[in-house]
Image (tube, rainbow, N blue to C red):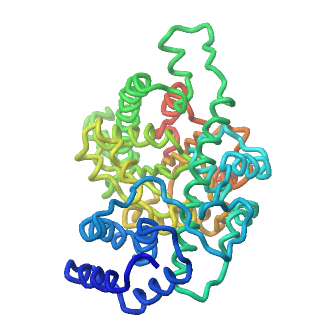
Amino acid sequence: MILKTDQLLKFSQFCKENELFFSSDRLSDLIIFLKKNELDNQDTEINFLYHLLPTNKLEKERLRDLINEFFGYSISTGQEEFLYLDEYKIDTMTDGQINIDFKNVSDDLLNNFGDIDFSRPVSNVYWLNQIKKSQNYIDEIAFFDVEFTSALDSIVNNQNKETYVEMLDLALLERIQELRNQFKEPYVPSDLSKKEDLQEKDFLFTDSDERNKLLKETRQLGLILANKFIRYSNSSSKGKLNFRKTIRKSLQSGGSLYKTVFKPQIRKKPRLILLCDISGSMALYSLFGLTLLFGVVQRFRSVKAFVFIDGLTEITKDLQNLKINNIKSILNNWNEYVKVDGHSDYQRSFEDLLASKSILNSSSNSLLVIGDARNNYRSINKDTIDKLSKCFKDIYWMNPERSQYWNTGDSRFMDFQQICEHYSEVRNFKQLKDFIIKINFKKVIR
């Protein structure tokens, strides 16, 4: 061991004085480890000290500064290196490091995973998470499932595993992006005007300027939808014509119907409930969904807007206080809307909706959902479907996934189709506009 025991003890005291405490057991294990491995030079030993003593990221960051101050040695903040452990015994291990071609490993994992449908409106991270669930991926990192008698060896092993997984995931994401770029077909517009061509372009393939233009028009569609519901709400609140009293009133004017009499007004006007899926599988479409919600909320107050991933969160007030250019902030703060694990859970989200005070007195309320109904192979309870059908007068659903992929894989759209007044594929502005135009709340008054 090149570092002296006294040096390590003084360094431990120095750390303690700077509010970073390491137990005597951990320090003792470190000294034993360094003596046993007989490393080449002091810099290597200091690097091991940096990797072995801390047990979390915060300790590690603080320790790096203290090492620089005490030993005058700067720990590299670049890509973490693998540390040598005898238990690995792998042919690719040289000079204390694991040399692995992560590109070949990622290709093998992708090939063994099977066909990946890159036309689906999901992010690269979505496909990465699907691959990480595969048995081949689990087997690939099982190399690190080794039991160690030394606590320090266990720490090294965990750090090696984290670094390996990080590098492998990065290689997978790069390869997925390459394959997605190969798959993407160039957009060939039909014989239409430039504006009409853009309206038919998949939201997923629009550039920044095109998106900004379409988002402004999407907001206008939200205003149109709000106006439709306002007219429906005002007409439904009047109550039905009281024919008998109207005839009696007409006798006072010689039978002329100068004054009509309606039944008592509905005390609570119908409410429009808006839901938008912002999970990873929704990719860019959730931005357009939120912009539509923004347009409705800005125009019509008798509305409740929600986003959901694995649970429901109301954003009505947030949208009322936002400016249109800041809508993306909701997606940027994605983690704030995660309730459990960050994977889509329509069952839990609709349970939250049914338990919400927002749908009380909901016999005349309408529900609009924007989502792909991809539920990560979770089931949908039939009782939940029945309750949704009873609680809402009308249910409308916009699905941004190509219709040929509905009800395949983990899609549970078939559970919701049966209770929808109207549903359609909506993945470009033309489809979105057609969907809004077809909604006519007055036609479904019962």
Return the x and y of residue 169 as percentages of the image width and height.
59, 53
Q: Residue at 61% across / 56% down in the picture?
A: 129
Viewer-side residue, 323 vs 328: 328
Viewer-side residue, 140 vs 306: 140
**Corner quadrant of residue 64:** bottom left
Return the x and y of residue 191 as percentages of the image width and height.
61, 7
**Corner quadrant of residue 62:** bottom left
User: Looking at the image, is 287 positioned above or below residue 387?
Assistant: above
User: Looking at the image, is 403 positioned above or below residue 30?
Assistant: above
Q: Residue at 47% across / 13% down in the picture?
A: 195
User: Could one spot residue 434 in this view of the protein?
Assistant: no
Left or right of 443, for residue 295: left
User: Looking at the image, is 36 positioned above or below residue 178?
Assistant: below
Return the x and y of residue 14 as percentages of the image width and height.
23, 80
Q: Residue furthest bottom?
A: 25
User: Could one spot residue 164 in this view of the protein?
Assistant: yes
Return the x and y of residue 394 as percentages of the image width and height.
52, 49
Q: Residue at 31% across / 32% down in the picture?
A: 256
Viewer-side residue, 409 vs 143: 143
Q: Residue furthest left?
A: 17
